Image: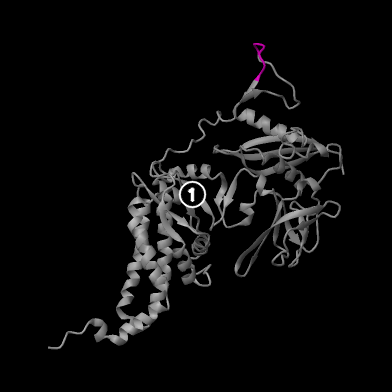
Amino acid sequence: MLARPTPQQAFAHRYAVIAQYFAQHPVWYQWAQTGSALWAAAPTLDAPGLLLAEQITRRAAWVLDGLLANAPADVGIWLAIGPAVTAAWETWQQIALQPVPAMPTQTLRFEPAADAALQTLLMWDPIRGHRTPPSPENALIALLQGTTVVASQAGGTAHPQILWHTLTDQDTLLGLATRYLHNPEAWPQIRQLNALHAPYISPRLWDVYGPPIVDFALAPTVDLTGALMTAPEIPAQSTTIVLPGVPAPLCAPGSVIVLEQWIATGRQQEAHPVIAYDAATFTATIGSPTQAAYGAGAFLSLNFNPALLTTQVLMPGQGIQIPRLGSQPLTALPDPQDPFGTDLYLSPAGDLRWTATGDVQIATGILNLQGALSRRLAAYLGTLPLHPFTYGSGLPSLLGRPMLHPHVVRGYVRMALLPDPRVAAVNPVTVMQDGTIWRITATVQIHGLPEPVTVAANLAQEAA
């Protein structure tokens, strides 16, 4: 009696084609090992581990789907694996949204090559068809080979308090709060944890490095008489940029110049650090040459040194911290009058005042904050020896000098107020000329306050 042939014997040609096809794509074998390990460890992974496992599985689904879609017809039944793999990351998404296990004991560890591969794949979104790595298959193999499930550093005795999420073009703080905290109204916790200021998440470099100290519109010729200062056009590969009318204190080394213009394919933008500035010719030397030419209609801004800013705006592709669901909420600012303390009240002339009962008048809350910010504007840089470069302004040094362009004065105001840790943004700044006096009014956004605060100061200068 003849033995019944096995499927491999009966369909030898098909099995040979299948074996050859999958031998050419080792990503399948690597995924079979690492993917099953991630799935088995899910009940014991901590919150960061679950989040990373979800991200890995989603990218693996995209890569494997592409391999199956391009497979030869003889692969046949293996095409059915595609939808199953695609659905896997959705299952992980649901798992990641659940509370962390009572005793998480494991997490994920990446080798340096795996971490670099993950960052490459996180920038890839085949649904919108952009940022495709040269070889998604090789990137996924490097990621899977360098990813291991290890014991949590906490030893299973404490919950991690922070989740990490890589931002996409569609992410908002409301959406992140809804997804991870199950409450859209909890978005201020994310903002506070990451020290963000409006607009919080943005693809524009102007937002990321802003608010600007001084901004310009580019034109073939320079005109200092308009409301918006103009600067010359900038050729490609330029290593110097002219900032008309900007004095040296506003363009300190470490400042950033941001360029932006619209072209046929969308927004074109770049940022360059300033390494030197010649105030006599208003010429800034930048640390890297410009990538493109910027002509009439483009915009240029001089921005504060990012290392000295107390808040930030994040771009898609960067990581954002999220408080773990179930952990203690971050301490929010209570009553708006409370965080800003109490101090002696000083009049605009710098004099003490007394109450009707003979006590020294005090300033509390927002009144105290307004006084502190006004004193920043009136103080020379270096007034506080321990903060020689972050407290005070360049405005007092202009007293008695010929009047400068209002745009330069606004730059000094922003430069003085932004280093205060309570200040999120300074915009707008109004400068009105009253004879030989500049009357300055700055609208300041304060962390934790829904409404901006107004700060006023007067600057006496000579007529030009």
Of residues 407 and 321, which is closer to you in this image? 321
Q: Is residue 435 visible?
A: no
In the rendered image of this protein, does residue 221 appear above or below residue 420? below
Is residue 241 toward the left or the right of residue 40 in the image?
right
Q: In the rendered structure, which segment of residues is drawn in magenta?
A: 356-361
Label 1: element kind:
helix
Image quadrant in which the C terminus is located: top right
Is residue 423 toward the left or the right of residue 73 in the image?
right
Q: Amino acid at mark 1?
A: Leu
Residue at 44%, 51% in the rendered image: 175
Instruction: Tell me residue 351's x, y (percent).
Output: 74, 22
Is residue 246 toward the left or the right of residue 169 in the image?
right
Check residue 358 for magenta coloring.
yes
- 10 Å neighbourhood of mark 1: few (<14), some, or many (≥20)? many
Residue at 60%, 69% in the rendered image: 265
Residue at 37%, 63% in the rendered image: 35
Instruction: Tell me residue 1's x, y (percent).
Output: 12, 88
Instruction: Tell me residue 71's x, y (percent).
Output: 39, 80
Q: According to the image, label 1 marks what residue?
A: 173
Which quadrant would residue 66 be assigned to in this image?
Answer: bottom left
Is residue 295 toward the left or the right of residue 141 in the image?
right
